[in-house]
Amino acid sequence: ELNPYNATAHMGLGNRLDLIGRTDEGIEKLQYALQFNPRDPRRGLCMVMLSRANSSIENYEEALRWAKEAVSVSSENPDFHYRLAICLANLDCIEEAQKNLQLCEKLKPGFLKERKAWLPYSNPERNQKFFQGMWKHNLLEPV
């Protein structure tokens, strides 16, 4: 309300709205943040938030699109490749998902171990939707 043109604030709000289950509103805020400030150096982070939000509502094609965008913005970020692997696994693209997981480790050794217990949502059903491909294809053990 104090600064409606603050793209960072919209990104943060969009992320939180998604995390508390108001995903449609969250996606709207995240997209606004990208449209309002398309050159923001943190735009890759906003893109992976959009990817996660779309995965959690089983919109896997859209999630994949955003994850690929994030990787194109910052190909050296292991988290972005991890999120891309999640999207690929949800779409049964197992070999590509495995390659991205291997790249995570190459970019930052120990990354996958650090992420082992990461569950972004407090709601187990949303985490299930987000990670179902990884768990189904044994790319990640269920927590």
Image (spheres, grey):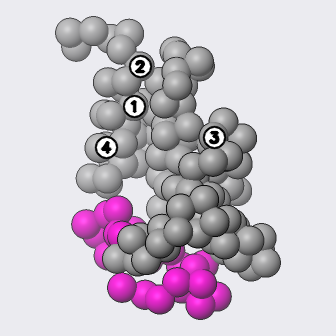
Is residue 121 inside the magenta stretch? yes
Residues at circles 3 and 4 in contact by the CB criterion of under 8 Å: no
Task: Read off the residue under disc 2.
Answer: 7
Query: Which residue occupies 33% across, 34% down?
Result: 12
Q: Amino acid at mark 4?
A: Leu
- Residue at image x 37%, y 37%? 14
Task: Please give the range of residues in magenta.
Answer: 118-143
Measure the alpha-carbon separation of dots 3 and 4. 25 Å
Q: Disc 1 marks which residue? A: 11
> What kind of element bears circle 2?
helix
For label 4, the crowd category at 10 Å Cα-Cα, with few meaning under 14, some 14 to 19 and many 20 or more, is many
Q: Work out whether 67 lies above or below 117.
A: above
> In the rendering, which numbered label is found on residue 53?
none
Q: Are marks 1 and 2 in contact (CB under 8 Å)?
A: yes
- Which of 59/41 is in front? 41
Instruction: Say which residue appears at 43% left-offset and 77% top-offset.
Output: 113
